[in-house]
Amino acid sequence: MTIFTPSFFFLGKTSLFPILIKKSLIYMTLSIFQCFILILWLISFFSFLSSILLKIIKFLERKYNFLYVCAVFNYRQGAHNVVAVTKEVYDKCSTPRRGSKVYRSGKDRVRLVKGQNYFMCNFPGHCGSGVKIAINAA
């Protein structure tokens, strides 16, 4: 067993770290203060990494628009439906044109576009009695 006691520079102070080398294992002893400083450094390092990752995610969100907001509609299947409509159809509660997307599952997840989104139930009498919603997605 060989014992080395080199002098290391740690935060402006010279400390002796006894290093024991035995069967390819290195043991270092640190003071409580040095452990505390090391933990603080690790926390700041990982918070720096997380801030960089957050910036990358925000950049990718703006560039590729892969993060989005969903509206979830839960209702009894067969009793209602959800139809994505325009503002004019929403205001008049009229039957939407053929191109409107109709959801019928009872557990619908609808991707919202930025700005106003209009939905209604087109079963007879439902929209007129208030089964409709306008959602503003920012």
Image (cartoon, grey):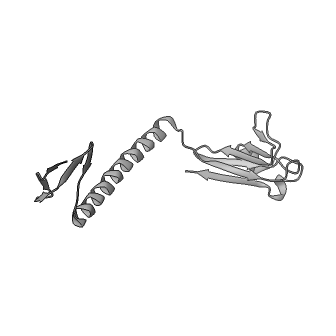
Q: Nearer the viewer, residue 65 or 2?
A: 2
Q: Position of residue 126 (x, y in %)?
A: 85, 53
Q: Quadrant of residue 105?
A: top right
Task: Kindly give the residue lying farthest to the front in the view shown.
Answer: 1
**In the picture provided, is 99 more to the left or to the right than 55?**
right
**Residue 54 image point, x, y percent:** 41, 47
Q: Residue furthest bottom?
A: 32
Residue in the picture at 35% in, 47% down: 49
Instruction: Using the image, determine if residue 99 lies above or below residue 82.
Output: above
Q: What percent of the width, then of the height, locates residue 6? A: 11, 51
Residue 12: tell me if it is visible.
no
Say which of 76 and 91 sits in front: 76
Q: Is residue 41 above or below residue 110?
A: below
Tag count: 0
The one of 33 and 112 positioned closer to us in this rendering: 33
Residue 114, quarter of picture: top right
Q: Residue at x 31, y 51 (%)?
A: 45
Extreme residue in the top direction: 99
Nearer to me, 84 or 50: 50
Q: From the viewer's perspective, is residue 97 above or below residue 2? A: above
Residue at 46 percent of width and 36 percent of height? 63
Residue 56 in view here: yes
The residue located at (27%, 63%) in the rendering is 36
